[in-house]
Image (spheres, rainbow, N blue to C red):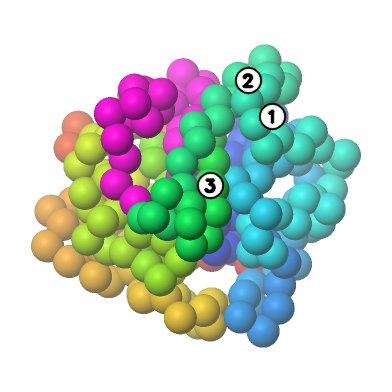
């Protein structure tokens, strides 16, 4: 499986058989200055209806667009309902976590999670090998809360997203606070990582990718 960070909360996950999944495609504007998404995909997952997460029309190839659980090309997508804030959605509404298995690896994209998970939500999520989690705060969990969520889930690999960089002008923090004092951090000079069951790290590891767009 290959995981490519296009930018913000948008990833391209490609299976060994060539199935292509795009998560939370954004609409570029003055606050999200990543390039336009021109990738082909078979599936697009949408965690919620904000402009920086729901631009399914930008994805090429006539993909199936999922906003709830479904199965496409033999891959089951499990939608876990959570909230965009810590007030049970009263501030920013709901959010959908998508969990799916690619090449025998359990992937979990948290969308704009805004709170610690409860036991029911953790049970629905189940075992996670690769966790894609927001860390920038303001609109999502901040560095401290994201760290607590990672500790709840215990994934083999964590890939942070939705944080400030030279192309994101939203009032969110950089990734640095989330990385502070973490024992295993790998900063890649690449937007893409290839993950297999054989190369999963023995110790929980954070991989920081560079945005492709």
Looking at the rendered structure, the secondary structure element under dot 2 is: strand
| Mark 2–mark 3 distance (CA, rounded to whole Å) | 21 Å
Going by the image, does 80 lie left or right of 212?
A: left
At horizontal 55% and vertical 25% (from top left) the residue drawn is 78
Q: Which residues are magenta?
A: 99-126
Please give the residue where the numbered disc 3 appears in the rendered image. 95
Label 2, residues with CA under 10 Å away: few <14, some 14-19, many ≥20:
some
**Residue 159, percent across and down?**
39, 51
Q: Report if residue 116 lies within the magenta region.
A: yes
Please give the residue where the numbered disc 2 appears in the rendered image. 75
At horizontal 63% and vertical 20% (from top left) the residue drawn is 75
Sequence order check, earlier mark of 2 and 3 = 2
Foreground: disc 3 or disc 1: 3
Q: Report if residue 103 lies within the magenta region.
A: yes
Sequence order check, earlier mark of 3 and 1 = 1
Residue 19 is labelled as 1
Q: Looking at the image, can residue 17 be seen? A: no
Going by the image, does 147 lie left or right of 72?
A: left
At horizontal 55% and vertical 30% (from top left) the residue drawn is 79
């Amino acid at each position: 499986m290959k995981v490519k960070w296009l930018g913000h909360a948008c990833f391209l996950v490609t299976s060994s058989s060539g199935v292509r999944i795009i998560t939370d495609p954004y609409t570029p504007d003055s606050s999200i200055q990543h390039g336009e998404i021109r990738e082909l995909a078979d599936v697009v997952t949408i965690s919620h209806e904000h402009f920086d997460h729901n631009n399914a029309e930008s994805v090429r190839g006539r993909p199936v667009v999922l906003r709830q659980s479904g199965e496409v090309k033999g891959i089951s997508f499990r939608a876990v309902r959570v909230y965009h804030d810590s007030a049970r959605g009263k501030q920013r509404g709901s959010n959908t976590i998508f969990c799916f298995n690619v090449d025998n690896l359990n992937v979990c994209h948290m969308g704009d999670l805004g709170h610690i998970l409860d036991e029911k939500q953790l049970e629905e999520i189940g075992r996670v090998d690769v966790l894609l989690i927001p860390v920038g705060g303001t609109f999502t969990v901040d560095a401290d809360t994201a760290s607590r969520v990672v500790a709840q889930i215990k994934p083999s690999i964590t890939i942070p997203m939705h944080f400030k960089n030279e192309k994101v002008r939203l009032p969110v923090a950089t990734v640095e606070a989330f990385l502070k004092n973490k024992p295993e951090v790998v900063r890649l000079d690449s937007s893409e990582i290839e993950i297999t069951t054989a190369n999963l790290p023995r110790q929980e590891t954070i991989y920081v990718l560079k945005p492709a767009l």
